[in-house]
Image (tube, coloured by chain):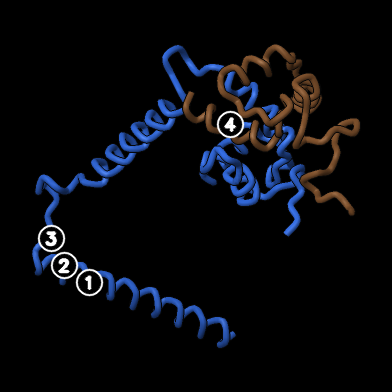
């Protein structure tokens, strides 16, 4: 079955709906043009960013959490 | 309907971000504001790349406004400045409110109209005179 666009793999074959913390840091670094470390992503998770089963991060859920945090800041 | 997370309209981005277990987290006007603030860092100016938007949000969350300021403060500040500008604009439009500008008396108004009509007739007569002079040659 073909993948839906939301399941498209980006940036070297990773699934943005299920990323490890290291993959998320690499993806954000590449997309933002500024270094993001796994420790920074972990700090967000410690601060309440949503984490899926198996310690994976869903980019959409993480972005939703970030947009809420930016407004509440 | 298929949505491409790397090429979202604002409405699609809002729906996608509000569709997570976190519930409603953002309104379209906020995404529009972010689109303007981030310029072309998160898309082509109209469409949004969710991956780049997430990266921008990641850094935006860490960057602070002036000490003690938040995005909410900024909005309140913007509203206050707008209200002050509106007040200044309205007060400058209200120069006749104190009663020192009066409508001219009726007779003066009538004579003004008379002068205007007379001026127009003079112009018209002059024009007709010049017109006939041209054709008489």
Q: Quadrant of residue A48?
A: top right
How far is the residue under mark 4 from the one under mark 1?
Answer: 70 Å
Instruction: Mark 4 and mark 3 in contact? Answer it, CB < 8 Å.
Output: no
**Mark 1 or 3, closer to the camera:** 3
Q: Which mark is residue A65?
A: 4
Name the residue at the front extreme: A54
Instruction: Mark 1 and mark 2 in contact? Answer it, CB < 8 Å.
Output: yes
Q: Is residue B26 visible?
A: no
Instruction: Mark 1 and mark 3 in contact? Answer it, CB < 8 Å.
Output: no
Instruction: Mark 3 and mark 2 in contact? Answer it, CB < 8 Å.
Output: yes
Horizontally, residue B115 falls left or right of residue A17, namely: left
Instruction: Mark 4 and mark 1 in contact? Answer it, CB < 8 Å.
Output: no
Q: Tell me the residue at 15%/72% (across/down).
A: B110
**Mark 4 or 3, closer to the camera:** 4
Image coords of residue B34 (percent x, y): 59, 35
| The chain coloured brown in the image | A
How far is the residue under mark 1 from the one under mark 2?
Answer: 6 Å
Q: Which mark is residue B113?
A: 1
**Towards the viewer: A10 or A1:** A1
The chain letter under disc 1 is B
Q: Tell me the residue at 29%/37% (across/down).
A: B88
Q: Quadrant of residue A70?
A: top right
Q: Tell me the residue at 84%/43% (across/down).
A: A8
Query: Mark 4 packing: few (<14 Cα in 10 Å), some, or many (20+)?
Result: many
Q: Are marks 4 and 2 on the same chain?
A: no
Residue on which disc 2 sits = B109
Q: Circle 3 sits in a helix, a strand or a loop, which is it?
A: loop
Residue on which disc 3 sits = B104
Q: Are marks 4 and 3 on the same chain?
A: no
Q: Tell me the residue at 86%/39% (across/down).
A: A9
């Amino acid at each position: 079955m073909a993948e839906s666009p939301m399941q498209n793999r980006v940036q070297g074959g990773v699934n943005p709906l299920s990323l490890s913390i290291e993959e998320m840091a690499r993806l954000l670094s590449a997309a933002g043009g500024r270094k993001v470390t796994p420790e920074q992503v972990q700090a967000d998770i410690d601060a309440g960013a949503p984490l899926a089963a198996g310690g994976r991060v869903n980019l959409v859920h993480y972005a939703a959490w970030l947009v809420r945090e930016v407004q509440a800041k | 309907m298929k949505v491409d997370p790397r090429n979202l309209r604002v409405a699609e981005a809002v729906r996608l971000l509000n569709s997570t277990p976190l519930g409603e987290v953002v309104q379209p006007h906020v995404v529009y504001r972010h689109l303007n603030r981030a310029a072309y860092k998160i898309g082509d100016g109209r469409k949004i790349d969710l991956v780049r938007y997430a990266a921008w949000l990641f850094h935006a969350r860490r960057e602070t406004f002036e000490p003690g300021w938040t995005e909410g403060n900024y909005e309140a500040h913007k509203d206050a400045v707008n209200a002050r500008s509106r007040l200044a604009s309205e007060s400058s439009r209200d120069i006749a409110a104190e009663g020192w500008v009066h409508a001219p008396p009726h007779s003066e108004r009538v004579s003004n109209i008379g002068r205007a009509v007379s001026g127009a007739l003079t112009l018209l007569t002059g024009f007709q005179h010049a017109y006939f002079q041209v054709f008489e040659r």
